[in-house]
Every structure is written in structure tokens, then in C-alpha cells.
Image (spheres, rainbow, N blue to C red):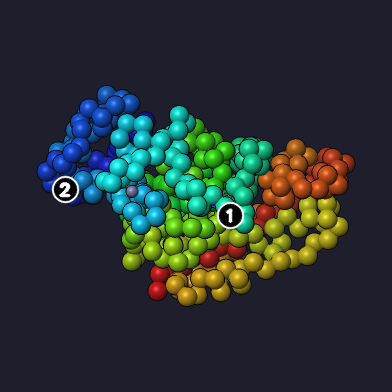
Amino acid sequence: MIGCARDRIEVRAAIDAGGPEPAGWDVETAAAGTNADCCRKRRLVIMRVSSYDAWIVAAAPLSCPVRGCERPLHRAEKTVVCARGHAFDIARSGYINLLQPADRHSRHAGDSKEAVQSRARLAAAGVGDGVLAQVADRITTFLPGDHGIVVDLGCGSGEALDAVSRRREITGIGIDLSSHAADYAARRFPALTWIVANADRRLPVLTGSADLIMSLNGRRNPEECARALKAEGYLLVSVPGPDDLVELRERVQGTSIERDRGTSVLADHSGSFELIEKMSLRQRQGLARESLLDLLRGTYRGRRTSQSAAVQGLDGLEVTLAQEVMVFKVR
Ligand SMILES: C[S@@+](CC[C@H](N)C(=O)[O-])C[C@H]1O[C@@H](n2cnc3c(N)ncnc32)[C@H](O)[C@@H]1O
Ligand SMILES: [Zn+2]
């Protein structure tokens, strides 16, 4: 189903483009599943958009994941299809599985249902919301004034992309290897596009189409990001700061070693990108035992029962949540 927020975006993009009806577009299909107000706007889109490709880009610039094809994907009822007829089902919850058999394998398996649920509970409890708000605010300053295309690599349960979409009209594409994550995000945030794919391989995004790609403790793929971004696009990478969860690590691991992840991010991106901004964001938050357990499940994947046992003995703990945020521009 196509949501109202996206309709508004498409209407505006269509008016900007100002052209004839795109060949092959079916009015009734376009209107299906939208409310009456959106249907009226849809007809406006159909009258004004200049080309079918322009419409696709305004919607979600997805590309076919079949190796060597890579043509634009467009929606057709319950699937997305390319011009060569490669078709991919849209799940009942709304996410699209573009994972090709050859791309299934990853050194990092996608998150389990349990990890996704833990992370979603943390977001619902407001854990880290101060840092997330600052990241989302900053992202909007790198987007075009009217409407931006934003891709989130390793989007998890989708709260970050949603936070951006609440601040600015965007076409948001969240990519995660975990179907549990995509399913959760699609149910929760239906106006955004949620994709199951391996972000370490070719991204299912059209070349030169994204205004901003973000990776928040997620996957990084500099070459593919450089390909998928517009010439004036930005890449925002955020990794845990050296003192992130230092108090929790002290309790459960008996050590609070501060690890610098930023340096390797800079090195990985130096070939294709130029660093334009680096920020350290942090907040301190008192967390109840349940949230601490969710942090273990979501962050350390609940690997060690000894760690959970250490948290069970706590009523709560004040922790530091810290992120190192780097913003890059394509060279
Ligand atoms: C630490 S979580 C971060 C989630 C989210 N960005 C956030 O900040 O809350 C990492 C996410 O990357 C996903 N992931 C792991 N390997 C991946 C891959 N190869 N391609 C896409 N997503 C992947 C996991 O399923 C998980 O949702
Ligand atoms: Zn194809």
C-alpha cells in the first residue's frame, strides 16, 4: 500500500517535473489502497510527471538485484518488477525481499527476531533518544530543502529513518539483512520503503540517486555508497564512541577498555570520500534493569549468560551513550 506522506512527496516532485502522463502507468493501480484525498493527488501526479523514470525516482529509486540487470524497479500490485520481468514479492507487512541467493551469506548475520525486538523496546523506552535526535537534526541540514532521498544501511527496526522522515519530507529506503528487522520496520513505518538485502554487496539502489546515505552502527560499503549517491550527496556514518556504555561494560565484562572505531571508518572511506564533519555526541541516562538486559541482547547479542547474570543483580544503572558521527562527501 502506498501511504499518504509519500503521495505528497510525489505530487511535489511531479509538479516540479511538469510533463505528460508517463507511458504504461495505470491510474487505477496507482490509486489502489490510498484514501480519497490521495487518489485525487495521484491523478495530479499522473498528469504532471515528465517521465516514468522521473516517477520511479520520486517514489523509491530501487534497482533490480539480478546480477547484470540492475534496471529500475517499479511497483505492480503486490510485486516490484524491472523491465526485463524480474519480479520480487512485496511481503504482507510491506517490505520487499531483494536478497539474491548468492548474496545471502555475510560475515555478519542479520539480527535475530529477539535482537530486533530488544532494540525496538529500547527505542520505545527512549534509550538513546537524545543522541538520535541530534543525528536526525544534523541529517536534515544535509538534505535538499524540499525533498530528499535517504538510504539507511543496516536500518534495524527503523526508528532512525523514521526520525529523519518526521523532520523532513523524504523518500526513505531502509536496507537490512534481517527479514525480522524489515518486517518490524514495515509494520511500524509503512510510509517508508523497507528492503531485505545484503548491504555488503551491490546495493539495490539506482546509480546517482540518493541525497544521503546513513549507516548508524550499521553496515558500511564505501564503493557502493559512492555509486548510489548523487554527485552532491552525503554519507553519514555513526559508530559507538570510545566511552559508549562504559559503565555497563565495566559491570558485565569487568573492564572498560575504550575502543576507537572512528579511525578505521576514516581509513575505509578515504579512497572515495572526503570527510567534511566529525562530531562526538553523548548523553547520560539512568536505565532500568530490563533496558540493560535489552542492551545486552541488542548490542552484545546476549552471548554470555554470565553478563546477563551480572545485570540481573542490578536495579538499574546510569550509562553513557556515545556516538562518533562522521559526514563525508563524494570526492
Ligand atoms: C547494530 S544494528 C544497528 C541498527 C540501527 N542502524 C540502529 O542504529 O539502531 C546492525 C544492523 O545491521 C544489520 N545487518 C547486519 N549485517 C548486515 C548486512 N550484511 N547487510 C544489511 N544489514 C546487515 C543487522 O540485522 C542489524 O539490524
Ligand atoms: Zn531485472
Q: Quadrant of the N terminus?
A: top left
Ligand 1 within 8 Å of the CB at mark 1: yes
Residue plotted at (40% across, 69% down): 330
Q: Is residue 93 above or below residue 330?
A: above
Left or right, 47 with reference to 100: left
| Label 1 neighbour load within 10 Å: few <14, some 14-19, many 20+ | few
Q: Determine the secondary structure under disc 1.
A: loop
| Label 2 neighbour load within 10 Å: few <14, some 14-19, many 20+ | many
Measured as percent of width and height from the top left, residue 177 is found at 54, 47
Determine the CA span between mark 1 and mark 2.
Answer: 40 Å
Measured as percent of width and height from the top left, residue 300 is found at 72, 50
Total numbered circles: 2
Quadrant of the image occupied by residue 274:
bottom left
Measured as percent of width and height from the top left, residue 62 is found at 36, 49
What amino acid is found at the position of numbered circle 1 in the picture?
A: Ser
Q: Determine the secondary structure under disc 2.
A: loop
Residue picked out by circle 2: 50
Would residue 190 be visible to someone looking at this image?
Answer: no
Q: Looking at the image, which residue sits at the far left?
A: 20
Left or right, 205 with reference to 200: left
Q: Looking at the image, which residue sits at the far top?
A: 36
- First in sequence, mark 1 or 2: give its number: 2
What amino acid is found at the position of numbered circle 2 in the picture?
A: Ser
Q: Is residue 190 above or below residue 53?
A: above
- Nearer the observer, 202 or 157: 202
Residue picked out by circle 1: 106
Residue plotted at (61% across, 68% down): 262
Q: Quadrant of the C terminus?
A: bottom left
Left or right, 318 with reference to 96: right
Camera-side mark, 1 or 2: 1
